[in-house]
Image (tube, grey):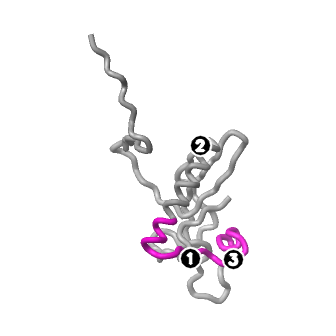
Amino acid sequence: MSTQPDTPAPVGRMAVSLPANLEPVYSNFALITHSPSEFVLDFAQMMPQTPQARVVARVVTTPVHAKLLLRALAENVSRFETQFGPIATPDTSTLADHLFRPPSQGGSSGQSGSPGPGSPPNQGGPPAGG
């Protein structure tokens, strides 16, 4: 009887299975909270003229995974900017200033915050708040 050693998976590669019924969701806003043992990422949709964001997905993860996710996002943003050019971000003092400014009083657009689906994309891309 012969035994073969287990062949380890290639480093950095992992098979991923996507369920056939998995529905993608659109998010243009994120709320991030944490405790000593976990990070909670609530992905939401903000619509024009709507004072409340609607959470469409919640991800709870470990601090180590959150840090690895941050690294992966930074690497992918860098690749994106190399290919497509810099992503402009708002010049406001804080993200909250940009997202929660009151609607313009004299303007005809009446839009505040980030654009929702169907609106032209903002220059800063999808916001992440915390």
Q: Which residues are magenta?
A: 78-100
- Secondary structure of the residue carrying numbered label 2: strand
Query: Is residue 95 shown above or below 105?
Result: above
The residue under label 2 is: 61
Give the crowd class for mark 3: few <14, some 14-19, many >=20 residues within 10 Å: few
- What residue is at 32 percent from the left and 21 percent from the top? 4
Give the crowd class for mark 1: few <14, some 14-19, many >=20 residues within 10 Å: few
Give the crowd class for mark 2: few <14, some 14-19, many >=20 residues within 10 Å: some
Reply yes or no: does residue 92 show up in magenta: yes
Query: Is residue 88 shown above or below 14?
Result: below
Q: CA distance from mark 2 to mark 1?
A: 29 Å
Looking at the image, is mark 2 or mark 1 earlier in the sequence? 2
Residue 61, horizontal then vertical, whole percent: 59, 43
The residue under label 3 is: 92
Query: Which amino acid, mark 1?
Result: Ala
Residue 34, horizontal then vertical, whole percent: 69, 47
Looking at the image, is mark 3 or mark 2 earlier in the sequence? 2
Residue 76, horizontal then vertical, whole percent: 49, 61
Question: Which part of the image, by quadrant, shows the N terminus?
Answer: top left
**Residue lying furthest bottom:** 106
Query: Which amino acid, mark 2?
Result: Thr
- Secondary structure of the residue carrying numbered label 3: loop
The residue under label 1 is: 88
Q: Nearer the viewer, residue 61 or 28?
A: 61
- What residue is at 71 percent from the left and 73 percent from the top? 97
